[in-house]
Image (cartoon, coloured by chain):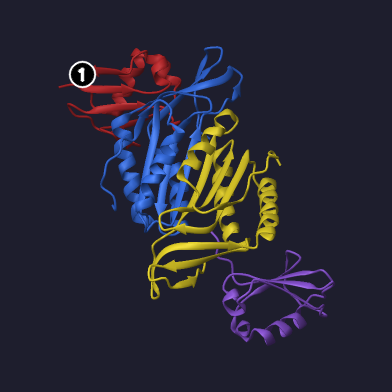
Chain colours: A blue, B red, C yellow, D purple
């Protein structure tokens, strides 16, 4: 564990695009870093038989998600040579076109950041107790299913 | 002390509540039986169980104060 | 080719962190996008036998790089289902801690964006006629060698 | 019309120039010979050649107006 500072993991509502620039800027003093790999999840306006998605409402088993996220984080720091890792997930309503997931992994050489970021995104989808409910323009709702 | 049961995601469509407190039962299989009597909609639902934030695969003995979470497939991200 | 608009590929000096937020924000109206994969290269303060890196000075065979980049772009659009792809590389001097490469790939589902972005970064390093000269704090210089 | 020769990256440490115009030669092998006579430092340098922005692997016939680039290993990104 190279970094001890605690960030919140869950953010209420959409993650502002500006946060990506602000967080990136903070890393300019970490001059051992050579590569940043970032993943952003954006809410899509999917057309389902029940209607057109206009937002997703996220809920979570927060305590379990945080403890599971800590496990994932430690596993990836053990597996890859990383400088730092930051992850944010929305809770509550995120409208179409807005960001609901922000994953940010930095390392000295690119391969570690890229591979760890890709693996982290899969683990977040697979292992974290978070649920999205799709809200349609016609006010119908359906629980999201991950692919 | 009793057992706290948490419901998440689509399961709350069947239970209309996200949390309940029930008397101690033997194990998670018995808990499922009791819960499904009250909320028969859960019989058709797909879910996994966590006891004290640890996912379980098999029937698990319960003790006073345990927190049991019923969770449908995750769909974060 | 889903996108025809032409961006510059080479930017003079460091790429501002703010550009990442601005470019991301522009994609909020593209509601078929579900995933953005971003890679950023940051100049490291490596310690070499000749000294401590304080900047990299980039030069390129610009015409060839642009034509090669167009080939790479078309190849990736043919191979992956992508919504858009933006790439920026610095020319001139980029100081330690600053960004010299910004790769931004978007798609409907995450796998395409993640895989295409990773492949694109490798192709940029391997196939584009760009050279970095490391400038040391003691004013020595050495030509960078990619790993 | 002659041939334009471009030098990039570390090669310019040997040539002290980034571009020269020379009389037409037969092919890229002959071009290398001529260039290396003027800039013997290039004999030890590792480089690849592009003719009109296309990388070449083998000796290539040159014609008037061709642009030949001598490029050391790339180190972008």
Q: Position of residue B47 (x, y in %)?
A: 41, 28
Which corner quadrant of the image does residue C61 belong to? bottom right
**Residue B55 visible to an observer of this rendering:** yes
Going 56% across and 49% down the picture, which residue do you hit? C117
Mark 1 Cα within 10 Å, few/some/many (few <14, many 20+)? few
Q: Is residue A12 left or right of residue C72?
A: left
Q: Position of residue D52 (x, y in %)?
A: 76, 65
Front-lying residue, B19 or A81: A81
**Residue A115 visible to an observer of this rendering:** no
Going 22% across and 23% down the picture, which residue do you hit? B3
Q: Mark 1 falls on what kind of element?
A: loop
Which corner quadrant of the image does residue C27 belong to? top right
The answer to whether C96 is drawn above or below residue D69 in the figure is above
Q: Position of residue B75 (x, y in %)?
A: 45, 31
- Read off the chain for label 1: B
Q: Position of residue A33 (x, y in %)?
A: 39, 56
Front-lying residue, C87 or A94: C87
Front-lying residue, C59 or B73: C59
Picture mark count: 1
Q: Is residue B62 left or right of residue A91?
A: left
The answer to whether D9 is drawn above or below residue C73 in the figure is below
Q: Which residue is mark 1?
A: B23
Q: Is residue B52 left or right of residue C65?
A: left
Which corner quadrant of the image does residue A7 belong to? top left
């Amino acid at each position: 564990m190279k970094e001890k500072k605690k960030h919140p993991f869950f953010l209420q509502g959409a993650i502002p695009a500006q946060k990506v620039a602000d967080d990136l800027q903070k890393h300019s003093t970490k001059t051992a870093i050579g590569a940043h790999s970032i993943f952003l999840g954006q809410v899509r306006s999917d057309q389902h038989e029940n209607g057109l998605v206009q937002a997703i409402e996220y809920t979570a088993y927060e305590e379990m998600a945080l403890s599971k996220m800590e496990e994932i984080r430690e596993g990836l720091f053990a597996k890859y040579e990383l400088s730092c890792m930051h992850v944010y997930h929305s809770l509550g309503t995120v409208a179409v076109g807005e960001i609901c997931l922000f994953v940010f992994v930095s390392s000295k050489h690119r391969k570690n950041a890229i591979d760890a970021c890709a693996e982290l995104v899969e683990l977040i989808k697979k292992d974290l107790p978070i649920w999205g409910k799709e809200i349609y323009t016609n006010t119908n709702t359906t629980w999201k299913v991950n692919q | 002390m009793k057992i706290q049961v948490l419901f998440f995601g689509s399961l709350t469509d069947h239970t209309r509540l996200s949390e309940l407190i029930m008397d101690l039962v033997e194990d998670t299989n018995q808990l499922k039986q009791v819960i499904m009597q009250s909320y028969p909609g859960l019989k058709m639902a797909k879910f996994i169980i966590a006891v004290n934030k640890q996912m379980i695969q098999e029937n698990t003995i319960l003790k006073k104060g345990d927190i049991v979470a019923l969770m449908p497939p995750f769909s974060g991200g």
